[in-house]
């Protein structure tokens, strides 16, 4: 199913995409949390110290000392205390030791410690919840992507694929970008909905500082989640459209858009790409800028000294004097802010880290966007070149649902219609060749029938074969018009391949007659005539099975110069052959009835033979046919007769030739004697009987004064 070459079956990416998107999320969130921790470190330290002091005071009121406490306890009690202060079998409160990650070592009644008040505990819980949800999503993603991995693995190893597995992959392949993004997005949605509920619940936070930190974390986490999901969707979509789609769907299916979503636009994709490559870095930078500022009201300074004003505001004295005031009159507004050195340091760390992540994101997004456009365009250009070379079935794969997909689909439709048009033209040309032979075009020097013009002509020497069914008029009277039509087609179906296989072509059918031309050699025409007589015998055998009358045919062959050309008018043209050679071939066919021969050729055909001895023939007569003033020497090809007739003619060939010699020298008695002997041996030899009749007439009536041995003959055209 590859587009142009057989491509290696790629691996299906599932876990790799999930893991990369998750790492992108943490890489965006963790630097932000680090900076938050450092920014609010003094407040967190002060709050932690106060809580430790309160807990230690409460612990001293309940216990003498840590040493006394340990001395009073047995070893079992110590072990129990280290793991919590309460007995699992009793509801009574007991003292114990507990190690808290935020409060240090706590001694006393640990059940009374409010864990919800731990610094950063809500962020930690949210982090833990999201981590656990991501593990679940990884497991769900593995379940969904496992069939795809299995199918592609079996394809790479050329193993059989079950229909059930193939149907599943075919059904969900195009939806896999949405499904994979949805599986991972489900974890993010649940986690952030939980975080939002805590933000909207007043009792979730004991102090405003904890709430502020949590809100900051929520927004940066939400932004990172959206970017991670987009990363999953576009990576998976890119691989599905560029690498996977042609391995699941057939080339016929991919000739059109198979995406069951609304039509996309390259413009929208470019807008999104531009937004992701510009707004992403800008959004992250703005996050860290706001995170790094400190408002002046947070300093809790009432009156600022001139030195403090200069540090915070710069050289304010000249600035104030510009407006006619003094530096002592200027008060520092609380809404103004500044960025201290530590905040600036961590701000740059966060910005550089985020820009690095953004650079990786942009690199992948630009790569995918570019390949999603360039790859289909290259395929389309390749297919267009192949179409230009005449490959009409080289369709492009519709990989996208935008203008490129529409263009590819239009190209496929155009190629399909163009292929159909060319096929129709080819069929039409093939059909024309049944009416006008292709050889006719070649002789005229034309490449196509559309190049033929009225009056086109060429002179060429050819051998003309003319064949006709004897007494067909009487036979046709016994059949209906439809039976006549079917009979003729059946007969011509036997004869046409013989002519074609002997390098000839049929110029026209004239009822039951065939006119064929042979341009390469005279032998082709004679071989075809002999084979036609054999096919006629087979045809009669079939007719005899259906109780149909047998038929006989005569063939006349003459070689000469003729004109091939186009005749007619602008409204109706026809290719034809005009020559005296054509007329003579038709006259020779008529003489077969006079002399009882199967095949008669002229002397012009005989002398063109490379080896006349390869055929059995005999001289028949010198005739002057109707419409021709010059006499023609005619010869009979004996090889066209049935075997028994052929053997009798070969047996009497010398005696027949002797009779011809006596006849031409006016020794009619001797000639008559020879021909009668031939007739005695071969009673079916009509040529010998014809000469017996002539000799008897000359003996009884005398020889005309102008007799030159040339016989003027005609024939009845109404057969």
Image: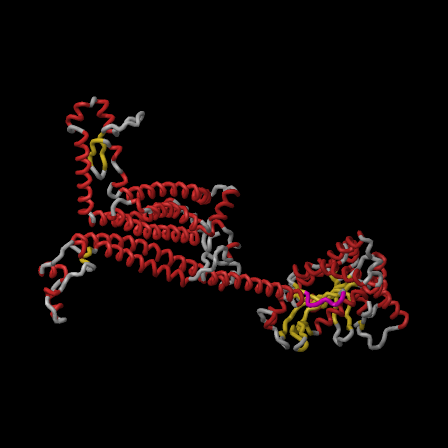
* 664 in the magenta segment: no
Q: Is residue 508 magenta?
A: yes
Q: Is residue 478 left or right of residue 304?
A: right
Question: Is residue 659 in view?
Answer: no
In the rendered image of this protein, does residue 202 appear above or below residue 97? below
Q: Residue at x 63, y 74 (%)?
A: 459
Q: Which residues are magenta?
A: 506-511
* Outermost right residue: 700
Q: Residue at x 47, y 60 (%)?
A: 263
Which quadrant does the C terminus fall into?
bottom right
The residue nearer to you, when weighing 699 against 488, is 488
List x then y, in percent, for residue 522.
66, 64
Q: Percent x, y for residue 702?
A: 88, 73
Establish if 228 lies above or below 77: below
Corner quadrant of residue 48: top left
| Outermost residue, front side | 61
**Residue 629 vs residue 435: left or right?**
right
Which quadrant holds residue 661? bottom right
Q: Is 90 left or right of 636, judged from the image as shown?
A: left
Q: Is residue 504 visible?
A: yes
In x, y percent, where is residue 359? 29, 55
Render colour scheme: secondary structure
In percent of width and height, residue 449 lies at 61, 70
Q: Nearer the viewer, residue 579 or 690?
A: 579
The overriding secondary structure of the stretch rendered in magenta is: strand
């Amino acid at each position: 199913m590859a587009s142009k070459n057989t491509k290696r079956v790629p691996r299906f990416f599932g876990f790799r995409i999930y893991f990369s998107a998750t790492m992108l999320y943490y890489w965006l969130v963790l630097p932000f949390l680090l900076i938050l921790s450092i920014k609010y470190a003094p407040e967190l330290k002060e709050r932690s110290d106060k809580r430790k002091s309160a807990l230690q005071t409460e612990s001293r009121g309940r216990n003498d000392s840590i040493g006394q406490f340990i001395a009073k306890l047995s070893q079992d009690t110590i072990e129990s205390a280290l793991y919590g202060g309460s007995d699992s079998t009793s509801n009574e409160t007991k003292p114990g030791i507990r190690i808290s990650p935020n409060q240090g070592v706590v001694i006393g009644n640990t059940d009374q410690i409010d864990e919800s008040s731990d610094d950063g505990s809500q962020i930690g819980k949210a982090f833990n919840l999201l981590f656990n949800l991501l593990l679940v999503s990884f497991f769900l993603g593995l379940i969904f992507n496992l069939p795809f991995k299995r199918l592609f693995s079996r394809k790479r190893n050329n193993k059989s694929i079950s229909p059930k597995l193939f149907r599943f992959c075919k059904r969900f392949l195009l939806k896999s970008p949405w499904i994979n993004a949805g599986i991972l997005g489900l974890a993010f949605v649940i986690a952030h909905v939980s975080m939002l509920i805590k933000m909207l619940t007043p009792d979730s936070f004991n102090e405003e500082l904890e709430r502020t930190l949590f809100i900051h974390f929520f927004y940066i986490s939400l932004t990172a989640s959206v970017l991670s999901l987009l990363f999953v969707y576009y990576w998976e979509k890119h691989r599905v459209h560029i690498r996977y789609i042609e391995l699941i769907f057939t080339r016929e299916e991919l000739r059109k858009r198979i995406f069951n979503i609304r039509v996309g636009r390259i413009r929208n994709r470019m807008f999104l790409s531009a937004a992701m490559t510009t707004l992403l870095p800008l959004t992250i930078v703005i996050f860290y800028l706001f995170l790094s500022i400190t408002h002046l009201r947070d300093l809790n300074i009432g009156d600022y000294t001139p030195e403090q004003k200069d540090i915070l505001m710069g050289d304010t004295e000249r600035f104030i004097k510009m407006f006619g005031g003094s530096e002592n009159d200027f008060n520092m507004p609380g809404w103004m802010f500044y960025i201290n050195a530590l905040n600036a340091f961590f701000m740059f760390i966060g910005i550089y880290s985020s820009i690095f992540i953004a650079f990786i994101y942009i690199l992948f997004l630009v790569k995918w966007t570019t390949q999603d456009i360039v790859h289909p365009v290259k395929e389309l250009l390749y297919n267009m070149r192949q179409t230009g070379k005449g490959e009409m079935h080289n369709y492009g794969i519709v990989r996208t649902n935008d203008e490129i997909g529409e263009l590819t689909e239009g190209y496929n439709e155009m190629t399909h219609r163009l292929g159909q048009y060319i096929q129709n033209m080819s069929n039409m040309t093939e059909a024309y060749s049944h009416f006008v032979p292709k050889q006719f075009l070649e002789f005229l020097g034309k490449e196509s029938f559309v190049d033929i013009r009225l009056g086109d002509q060429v002179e060429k020497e050819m051998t003309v074969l003319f064949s006709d069914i004897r007494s067909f008029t009487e036979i046709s009277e016994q059949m209906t018009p439809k039976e006549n039509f079917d009979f003729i087609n059946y007969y011509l179906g036997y004869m046409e391949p013989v002519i074609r296989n002997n390098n000839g072509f049929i110029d026209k059918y004239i009822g039951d007659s065939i006119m064929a031309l042979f341009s390469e050699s005279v032998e082709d025409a004679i071989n075809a005539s002999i084979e036609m007589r054999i096919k006629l015998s087979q045809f009669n055998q079939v007719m005899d099975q259906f109780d149909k009358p047998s038929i006989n045919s005569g063939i006349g062959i003459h070689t000469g110069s003729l004109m091939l050309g186009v005749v007619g008018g602008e409204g109706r043209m026809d290719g034809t052959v005009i020559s005296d050679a054509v007329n003579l071939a038709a006259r020779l066919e008529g003489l077969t009835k006079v002399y009882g021969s199967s095949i008669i050729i002229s002397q012009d055909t005989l002398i063109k033979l490379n080896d006349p001895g390869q055929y059995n023939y005999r001289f028949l007569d010198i005739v002057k046919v109707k419409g021709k003033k010059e006499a023609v020497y005619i010869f009979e090809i004996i090889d066209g007769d049935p075997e028994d007739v052929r053997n009798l003619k070969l047996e009497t060939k010398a005696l027949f030739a002797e009779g011809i010699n006596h006849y031409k020298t006016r020794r009619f008695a001797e000639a008559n004697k020879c021909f009668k002997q031939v007739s005695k041996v071969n009673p079916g030899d009509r040529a010998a009987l014809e000469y017996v009749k002539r000799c008897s007439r000359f003996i009884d009536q005398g020889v005309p004064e102008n007799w030159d041995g040339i016989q003027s003959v005609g024939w009845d055209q109404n057969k």
